[in-house]
Image (cartoon, rainbow, N blue to C red):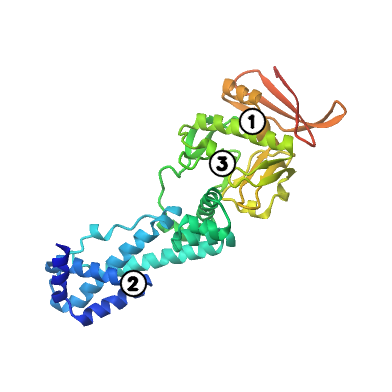
C-alpha cells in the first residue's frame, strides 16, 4: 500500500517543489538525513489530504504548512522528555489539529515561534546550571546519547549517572520556577504527582501543621515541607531519593522506612567514620560541620533544607565527590531516627521539637534534644555527645 502511495506522490509533486521542501525541513530540524524522511512524510500527508487544498494558488503555502507541522511533530517527539522536566504543556499533536482546516499559516507560525521561545528559555536555564549538571542533561536529552555511552564518557556507573540526571532535572526545574519563574509561567502547567499535597503526617518540628509532600515511588523520592517551618517555595524540611523508598506509595510507610534508613545510614557512618556511597560505592567520610561549611555544589540543590535549626546549626553530612550524592541531616533529624523517637512519634502523632540545649554531663559537653507530645503530657529526652553525636542516654517521662 505504502509503495503505491509513494509512486502516486512522485506524480503529485515536482522536483523543484521537493527540493524546496527538503531545504525547509532541513532548516527546521538541522539534519539533512532526517529531513529526507520528513519530506516523504509531508508528501504522504499532502497526498492523503489533497482535497483540503481549496485554492490552487496557495499550493506552496499549503505544502509549507504541512511540512512545518511534520517537522514540529518530530521535534516535539524528540523533545518530549525535556518538556516533562519543566512541566511544559505538550503542544496539541498536529494530527489532532484539523490539517484540512486550511492549515492556516498564521497558526503554524505561532506554533513554531512558541517552540523557539521554549528552546531559548531552556537554553538559558541550562546555562545557569553547573557545568557538570548541564553536560549530562544535554548529552541525554538534547544529543539523545545512550545512558551506557554517557556513563562511559564520564567514568560513572549506571546508578550514579541516573542519580545525577535526576538531580539535574530537579535543578533545572528549580531554575525555571525561581530565577525564571515569570518567563516560564505562561507555559507552565500543574502536574499531578509533582505538586505538593497534604499528607497525614504532622510536622515533628512544630507540631502545628500537617506536612506537605511530593512522592515518586518509581524513583524512591520523598520530599516533605511544612507551611510554617519551610514556607518558601524552594524550601523543604526533608528531601530524599533512596532505593529503600522505591515501590512505597503511602506517606506513613514512606516516612517509617525513611526513618529506619536514616538510623542505619547515619549512625553506621558516625560509628565507623565513613560510609560507602549508596550510588557508586565510593567510601566517603562523614563530617559534623556547620551548614555554611557544606560543599558549594550542595548549596545548589533543588530545595534548600530549612527547619527550626535554632542556635545549633551543625549537620551530619556525607558527600560523594564522584557522583555528587550527598546526605545531610540535622541533629534533630538524626535524633528523630532513633527507634525510641520513632516509637514516640507513632504513639502521639503530633509532637514538637523543643530548642536544642547545650549541657555538661558525665564530665563532657553534650546536646539535649527534647520531643514533647502536643496532645499528652509526655516528653522524650535524648542526650547526645557534643563532638561525636553518640547517643549517651534516652529518657522518657512527663513534662
Please say if the residues under marks 2 and 1 sit with CB atoms less than 8 Å apart: no
Name the outermost residue toward the right.
363
Residue matched to label 3? 240
Instruction: Give the mark nearest the N terminus, 1 or 3.
Output: 3
Q: Position of residue 208 (x, y in %)?
A: 58, 31
Which callout, 2 or 3, points to the residue nearer the camera? Answer: 2
Q: Nearer the viewer, residue 118 or 79?
A: 79
Instruction: Give the mark nearest the N terminus, 2 or 3.
Output: 2
Give the Cα distance between marks 2 and 1.
Answer: 57 Å
Residue at the location (45% across, 45% down)? Answer: 194
Residue at the location (54% across, 64% down)? Answer: 127
Q: Is residue 233 left or right of residue 192?
A: right
Q: Position of residue 115 (x, y in %)?
A: 38, 65
Residue at the location (29% across, 72% down)? Answer: 36
Residue 86 visible in the picture: no
Label 2: few (<14), some (14–19) or many (≥20) C-alpha neighbours in 10 Å: few
Q: Secondary structure at mark 1?
A: loop
Instruction: State the mark number for residue 337.
Output: 1
Q: Nearer the viewer, residue 55 or 93?
A: 93
Q: Position of residue 5 (x, y in %)?
A: 15, 67
Residue matched to label 2? 33
Residue 125 visible in the picture: yes
Q: Secondary structure at mark 3?
A: strand
Amino acid at each position: 500500500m505504502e509503495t503505491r502511495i509513494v509512486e502516486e506522490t512522485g506524480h503529485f509533486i515536482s522536483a523543484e517543489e521537493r527540493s524546496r521542501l527538503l531545504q525547509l525541513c532541513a532548516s527546521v530540524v538541522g539534519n539533512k538525513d532526517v529531513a529526507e524522511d520528513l519530506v516523504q512524510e509531508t508528501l504522504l500527508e499532502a497526498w492523503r489530504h489533497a482535497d483540503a487544498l481549496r485554492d490552487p494558488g496557495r499550493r506552496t503555502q499549503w505544502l509549507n504548512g504541512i511540512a512545518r507541522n511534520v517537522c514540529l511533530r518530530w521535534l516535539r517527539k524528540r523533545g518530549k522528555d525535556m518538556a516533562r522536566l519543566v512541566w511544559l504543556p505538550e503542544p496539541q499533536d498536529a494530527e489532532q489539529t484539523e490539517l484540512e482546516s486550511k492549515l492556516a499559516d498564521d497558526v503554524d507560525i505561532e506554533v513554531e515561534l512558541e517552540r523557539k521561545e521554549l528552546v531559548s528559555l531552556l537554553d538559558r536555564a541550562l546555562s545557569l546550571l553547573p557545568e557538570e549538571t548541564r553536560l549530562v542533561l544535554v548529552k541525554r536529552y538534547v544529543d539523545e546519547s545512550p545512558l551506557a555511552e554517557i556513563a562511559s564518557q564520564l567514568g560513572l556507573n549506571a546508578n550514579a549517572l541516573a542519580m545525577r540526571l535526576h538531580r539535574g532535572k530537579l535543578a533545572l526545574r528549580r531554575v525555571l520556577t525561581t530565577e525564571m519563574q515569570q518567563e516560564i509561567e505562561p507555559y507552565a502547567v500543574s502536574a499531578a504527582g509533582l505538586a505538593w499535597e497534604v499528607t497525614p503526617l504532622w510536622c515533628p518540628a512544630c507540631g502545628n501543621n500537617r506536612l506537605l509532600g511530593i512522592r515518586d515511588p518509581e524513583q524512591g523520592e520523598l520530599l516533605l515541607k511544612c507551611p510554617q517551618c519551610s514556607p518558601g517555595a524552594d524550601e523543604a524540611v526533608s528531601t530524599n531519593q533512596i532505593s529503600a523508598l522505591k515501590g512505597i506509595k503511602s506517606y506513613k510507610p514512606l516516612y517509617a522506612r525513611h526513618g529506619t534508613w536514616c538510623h542505619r545510614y547515619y549512625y553506621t557512618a558516625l560509628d565507623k567514620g565513613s560510609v560507602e556511597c549508596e550510588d557508586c560505592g565510593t567510601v566517603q567520610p562523614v563530617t559534623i560541620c556547620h551548614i555554611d561549611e557544606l560543599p558549594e555544589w550542595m548549596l545548589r540543590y533543588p530545595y534548600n533544607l530549612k527547619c527550626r535549626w535554632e542556635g545549633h546549626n551543625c549537620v551530619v553530612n556525607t558527600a560523594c565527590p564522584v557522583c555528587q550524592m550527598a546526605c545531610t541531616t540535622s541533629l534533630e533529624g538524626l535524633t528523630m531516627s532513633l527507634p525510641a523517637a520513632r516509637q514516640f512519634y507513632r504513639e502521639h502523632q503530633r509532637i514538637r521539637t523543643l530548642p536544642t540545649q547545650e549541657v555538661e554531663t558525665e564530665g563532657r559537653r553534650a546536646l539535649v534534644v527534647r520531643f514533647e507530645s502536643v496532645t499528652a503530657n509526655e516528653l522524650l529526652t535524648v542526650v547526645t555527645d557534643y563532638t561525636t553525636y553518640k547517643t549517651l542516654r534516652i529518657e522518657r517521662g512527663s513534662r
